[in-house]
Image (spheres, rainbow, N blue to C red):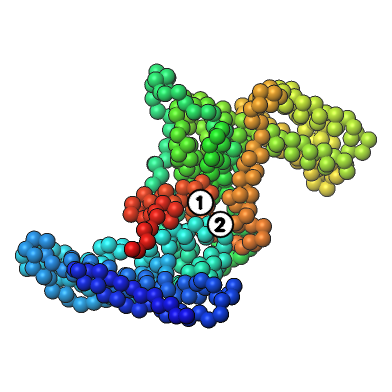
Amino acid sequence: MKIKIQFVTDRDNQSITEDIICLERQELSAETLGLILMEAKKITAEIQKKMVYHQIKDFVSQNRFCSCCGTARSIKGYHPLVYRTLFGRLVLKSPRVLTCQCQPQSQPHYSFSPLCSVLTTHISPELSYLEAKWASLMSYGMSAKLLEEVLPLEAHPASIFTNLQKVSTRLEAELEEEKLIFIEGCQRDWDQLPRPGTPLTISLDGGYVHAREGNNRKAGWFEVIVGKSMQEKQKPKRFGYVTDYETKPKRKLYAMLHNQGLQLNQDITFITDGGDTVRDLPLFLSPRSDHILDWFHITMRITVIKQMAKSVMGGDLPNFEKRLDRIKWFLWHGNVFKALDILESLDFELDTEVFAEGKDAKKHKKYKLYQSVDEFYKYIEANSTFIPNYGERYRYGEAVSSAVAESTVNEMVSRRMAKKQQMRWTKEGAHALLQVRAQTLNDELSDSFKRWYPKMVQSNAISLPLAA
């Protein structure tokens, strides 16, 4: 059996038929049932070439005539225009048209290319969307292999990287200008707002990524801040940035809240790890916001101190652990004053014992324990205003921990930039990837492309009629 596929073009009541491919099938088997991938790729590539050829031919013929006098303008010459699509790389024949004599000759461009005015980039919107989306979820090399596996095109990791950078730059260009205070209006204006939605809980946390600077592949680490906004019966939203690269981080957090329909009379709870990089980030975003130090980070630090004390405290260990438990109990109930009082006494006792030896203090077996206690004291003191009554919040079913943020670090950073993908990143590359990855995980990337390209249609939004 032979199956012939043809391409038919109807123009001005005339039909042009061109052969695409002729398929042959002999004995039926599971391997030969229907189209195979190689045939499908060849068919779509050929259809793409012929369809683009006729589209450009009609477009050039329509735009060759002067819009003022209707005279056919002369063609100065042709130049190749490379255009990458989902179904292959095309080299288009783009003409340069001379301006009409009826136009003033003092114009800055005596000739122009009608095709370049439409195809402003060298990649189709759909291919740009797929490359950006897949590269945000897997490595650039894997994205290129997958695209080549299922589509009739040649994909290169460097091209995918460049495209993702451009998409990220365009996403960031849409953000508002950075402000110190995003709160607008007064209490009277807020009271007149409609009834707000359910409260928002935003968890912020940091992670670390292997750094690379030029050819130096051992440049250490740099910090990444990620956050997730949770709302009852709503999909969570995420955002992220590189701390040493992003100079306007507050607007990113505000954009995420704005996308969830934030109102200035809506309750918001920010839960952070108390680090210097995130402590001031959520300030002045909403008049009805609470800022809470994550309970998980408090208990984690106390657990570390307990483990260190087991090897150096000896007979004083039971008393030391008892005092740590009291500190934990006071902090759980929001009594920061009592907790700091006990911490200060512990810090003083260890300081006296360690530094009694003078220059050999760093060799003392309790020196590292002293450092941990002293650091914990400063940590609680710096975040004292963000420590509520955790017990009361827990009994009322309110959030006390940023465990959600811990999972967001894994979701936004670790799965793509660490773990099995042990590659090193520049700050610029990691920051750009985080912007696109956040949009992908938030199901917002397709909406952004539809906003940039209004005529772009997703496959699930259209049903094609069959030929009669």
User: Along the line of sight, which residue is nearer the eye, 401 or 380?
Assistant: 401
In the rendered view, tell whether residue 331 sits above or below residue 455: above
Q: Is residue 400 left or right of residue 265?
A: right
Classify mark 1: helix, strand or loop.
helix
Quadrant assignment, res 53? bottom left
Classify mark 2: helix, strand or loop.
helix
Residue 5 locus on image (x, y percent) = 39, 75
What amino acid is labelled 1 in the image? Answer: Thr
Look at mark 2 in the image and give the residue it sits on.
Answer: 137
How many angstroms separate mark 1 from mark 2 (CA)? 8 Å
In the rendered view, tell whether residue 338 sits above or below residue 22: above
Q: Is residue 457 left or right of residue 295?
A: left
Is the C-beta separation of discs 1 and 2 under 8 Å? yes
Residue visible at 13% across and 67% down?
Answer: 65
What amino acid is labelled 2 in the image? Answer: Leu
One can see residue 435 in this view: no
Residue visible at 33% across and 73% down?
Answer: 7
Tell me the crowding category of disc 2: few under 14, some 14 to 19, or many 20 or more residues within 10 angstroms, Cα based.
some
Q: In this view, does 264 lie to the left or right of 122?
A: right
Residue 303 locus on image (x, y percent) = 79, 38
In the rendered view, tell whether residue 342 sits above or below residue 249: above
Look at mark 1 in the image and give the residue it sits on.
Answer: 440
